[in-house]
Image (spheres, rainbow, N blue to C red):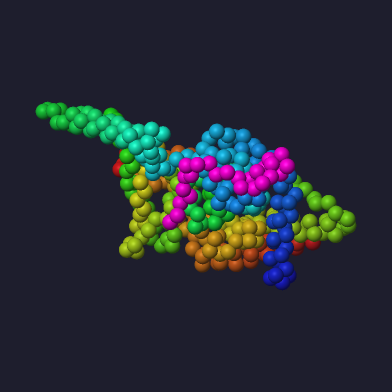
Amino acid sequence: MLENEFDKLLRDALRNEVKSAIGSLNGLETRIVSELEGRPPRLRPSDWLRQLLAPTRAGRIGQLAVVTATAAVFLVLGVFLAHETMLVPGSERLTPSLTATVNREILFVVPALDAKNVAVVGDFNGWEATPLSDDNHDGIWTATIPLSPGRYEYAFIIDGRWWGQDPLADEYVRSFGEYNSVRYVGQVGDGA
Amino acid sequence: MIDVEVETTRVKPCILVTEEANGSVYRGQDEVSLLRASLNGETEAWGEMVSRYKDAVFGLCLGFLRNRADAEDVTHDAFIRAYDNLRRYQLEKRFSTWIFTIAANLCRNRLRYRRNHPVVESPPNLAGGRDPAVIVEREDRWQRIREGLSRLPYNYRAPLVLRFYNDLSYREIGEILSIPEGTVKTRIHRGKAMLRKEVEREVIDHA
């Protein structure tokens, strides 16, 4: 069989298979629309901040009021945390029980000596690959990603292969029969 | 890098047809308008995006997973996940590349699950036609290809599906699967050679 003939056969085989099965997707858009009804896309932390700082209906004064109130909350929180972490003679340093709401730069590191392409996927990037870099070619790939406090599930993709057990993870979970790593940011077990 | 900005005002559909007359006021609108409307929580606009891309996403999932029920589930999940993460979508990327990336990652997860929870694939449907003999022979050849594809390792099967079903360039395939373009070319070349061998072996076994 000629090369072009084989390509056509492969193409037709795939297309015909989809054609004969596509009927089962009838009404998918309606199902998805009703499932998503009243649920806007998730806000990124930067959008959340932008919305917070956007002028309110009351105009500039309303905006200032929001900023002032936020600053006051942070001030009270700061004073509280400073008080909580003060050293008491003969005692251990107290750990603050509250977590900050600001983003933290979380470092993702993975050793992959001969890899050509390394990325991290997780619920923080919608399981879409964020590339890691190895600028000095020592086989240690890194990426720093700003994350707000919370629990994050993720895995590395090394040259297209899934690698779900990061030694720096706080724990591992089984997802679809394989491991994913979990990190807690701004909470107990936070490696940041 | 240009992100899709959050619109503070609702994007009004700009076509002069009623919803009843055309089924959806969003039909015929360009993708950017649909995405902006979706970002404002207009789920009907997202429904139109689903309608435009569902065949391509389903084809990818079916090709990757080789199981119709799983492909349906993952197609549904891919559109839900894409909607939830719509603010991460960047306009300089093609929407198809973005949604295919999400679908490919979900397929990879599902395949991993299936390794420990195998299912029996439903028998293929024969397509209708005029001459049963011609149809049976043609279907038989397609079926051999599909069975060969099911036996190929995922790393070779996925680039073949993206190339021959989704008609994507090597660069786009590399982007979706997180592998360099050179590796895509090698895998497609080797994948085809392996598939030909599988199909020819099938013919000899059946003779």
User: What residue occupies the far left of the structure in this picture?
Assistant: A89
**Magenta-drawn stretch contains B3:** yes
Indicate the position of residue B92 as horizontal and vertical percent values: 49, 57
Q: Is residue B189 left or right of residue A45?
A: right
Q: Is residue A149 left or right of residue A81?
A: right
- Above or below residue A95? Residue B94 is below
Instruction: Please state which of residues B82 and A185 is positioned toward the viewer in this rendering.
Output: B82
Give the tally of numbered discs. 0
**What are the residue bounds of the magenta stretch?**
B1-26
- Above or below residue A27? Residue A114 is below
Residue A34 seen in render = yes
Indicate the position of residue B122 as horizontal and vertical percent values: 72, 44
Q: Is residue A188 left or right of residue B82?
A: left
Quarter of the figure with the C terminus of chain B: bottom right
Instruction: Please state which of residues A31 and A131 is positioned toward the viewer in this rendering.
Output: A31
In the image, what residue occupies the spot 55% across and 67% down? B186
Indicate the position of residue B115 as horizontal and vertical percent values: 57, 45
Instruction: Please state which of residues A37 and B71 is positioned toward the viewer in this rendering.
Output: A37
Quarter of the figure with the N terminus of chain B: bottom left
**Magenta-drawn stretch contains A95:** no
* Main SS, magenta residues: loop
In the image, what residue occupies the spot 46% across and 48% down? B5
Residue B110 seen in render = no
In the image, what residue occupies the spot 56% across and 64% down? B170
Instruction: Please state which of residues B83 and A8 is positioned toward the viewer in this rendering.
Output: B83
